[in-house]
Image: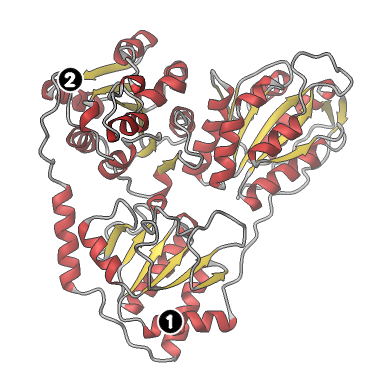
Amino acid sequence: MYEPKKTAFTAMKLHQRLAHALAEHGVTHLYGLVGDANLFMVNSYLEAQLGRYVACTHEANAVLAAIGFAQANGRTGVATITHGPALTNVSTALTEAAKGGIPLVLLCGDTAPGDVQHLQKTDQCKVVEATGAMFVDMRSPETAPEDLARAFQLATHRRCPVVFNMRVDLQWAETEIALPSGKTLEIKMAPATGSDLEEAVGMLASARRPLLVAGRGAIETTARQSILALAERLEAPVATTLKAQGLFRHIPFDLGICGGLSHPTAIEVIMQSDCILAFGASLSKHTTEERAYTRDKRIIQVLPDAEETPRLNTPTLRLIGDIAGTADAMIDLLDLAEIPGTQAADEDLAARLRNEAAHFAEIPAARETAAGTVDMAPALRRLHQALPEDRVLVADLGRFVTTAWRNLPVTRPQDLVYTSHFGGIGCAMGQAIGTATSVDDRPTVMVAGDGGFLLSGLSELSTAVREKADLVIIVCNDGSYGAEHIQFTNRSMAPGLSMISPPDFAAVASAIGLRAVRVTDQGSLDAACAAASERAGPLLIDLQLDPTKIDM
């Protein structure tokens, strides 16, 4: 957690004061697009060298970049835009953050309240409320630091996007500098206690095949250590949700992902389990395979807070408390009662999991596809092997996405940037800008479909070039809107309406300044793999795919 910096200034214009307030709240990366209601604040941020400003070409991508930053860095993302149409442009991005529980502060300009004929005037509070984000109004120049501090507090503790509304007519007001209103308070939950904890341990004590599952809410180092200690005490296997992928990497009894991406051994173990203990996991239909994995089992869910989220699977018992502390308390109770281990994690299971890992290392055989195209899964697996093992993965939404998640795994949870909370395509490029400009020790790999990339990706290529981003963009280009293509073909209808006929992405990217490779056969796939391993700046790989050979 960042401690606010104290400045030596005594008086300044409000736009300067707001810029310094960002530094006081530990903001190191500011994403945005300037207009008349925020440009002076951004200029002050740059002039005072308070942090890095990344200018985007569309307001939605600026907010998405802050979302990507927040997911990859575990800190509140910060963006800024002007008023009116700039705010309506970011409604999908704000909804994505709200549904994903992602902490974000958006500094948004606003028109003067008396300027009723201003072309860009709208009721910004109502626009924000419709997205599920919170709204904090800057009441006056004197209260501005306090108001902004409240926005950061809400974003951090409620894990949500907050729009800080700053009127343009106040930007040049003279303000007396105030001491920072205080750092963002760190709230530490106590471990779960009492009869519910005892009941949970009783369920574990009577289980013969327990399974521990960790979600994104359990990715802190101390939580990982405590969960693994509990698994060892129970002699139980562990697994993660997709969002926590890589948390238990190299652990002998790690089943990998619990959900639709589970491998055969994991599916068998999950189905045979009789008690699932989930830490920091929402247990959505994707994790439980529409509840097939949890049916007729006792389910214990441990969550780090009581914030409401769409938790679709009601557990047998839900505990609220610090995850590491609750896992440790469970171990203490098991020891006190002298409960023996279950032997559910044995050498036979370890050997089967090693075989699964060896199988993944093999390139799957390519299916025959239309001339000028390649088979997606083998192509992505080749690129996986050519890229550094440690990387950030940002995957857009589309029918390609499960194949991308499966064949381009990450080595730690923070490196999976999830863009699909709202179900909209086109959210990946902005988030990839946020990760590629803030994560310096590993490349960002972005995967998108041709439809999503056309929607919002092309315009931001210039940002990637300007920022010299270590970014590899893989376009899964089957020339169609995939979900719509499936709808037509499943009903034996001609899919013509779903076909896109996209431009030559490689040629467009090259013209903007990226290195680009168009993959149409094994020879060009070899060239793409070489470019990925030898990259020296942003790279685009256009995978030409057969729309009739795309697996969901």
Display coloring = secondary structure
Q: Residue furthest front?
A: 492
Q: Residues within 10 Å of mark 2 (few under 14, many from 20)?
A: some
Side of 147 where 134 appears, left or right: left
State whether residue 350 appears in this view: yes
Picture coordinates of residue 425, whole percent (x, y): 44, 31
Residue at point 19%, 67% (across, down): 350
Picture quadrant of residue 352: bottom left
What's under tag 2, amino acid-wise? Thr
Q: Which residue is mark 1?
A: 203
Which residue is disc 2 drawn over?
A: 520
Relative to 224, say whether 410 is above or below: above
Determine which quarter of the picture holds residue 221: bottom left
Residue at image point 21% right, 26% down:
546
Secondary structure of the residue carrying numbered label 2: loop
Q: Nearer the viewer, residue 143 or 127?
A: 127
Tell me the SS state at disc 1: helix
State left or right for residue 281 relative to residue 234. Answer: right
Q: Amino acid at mark 1?
A: Met
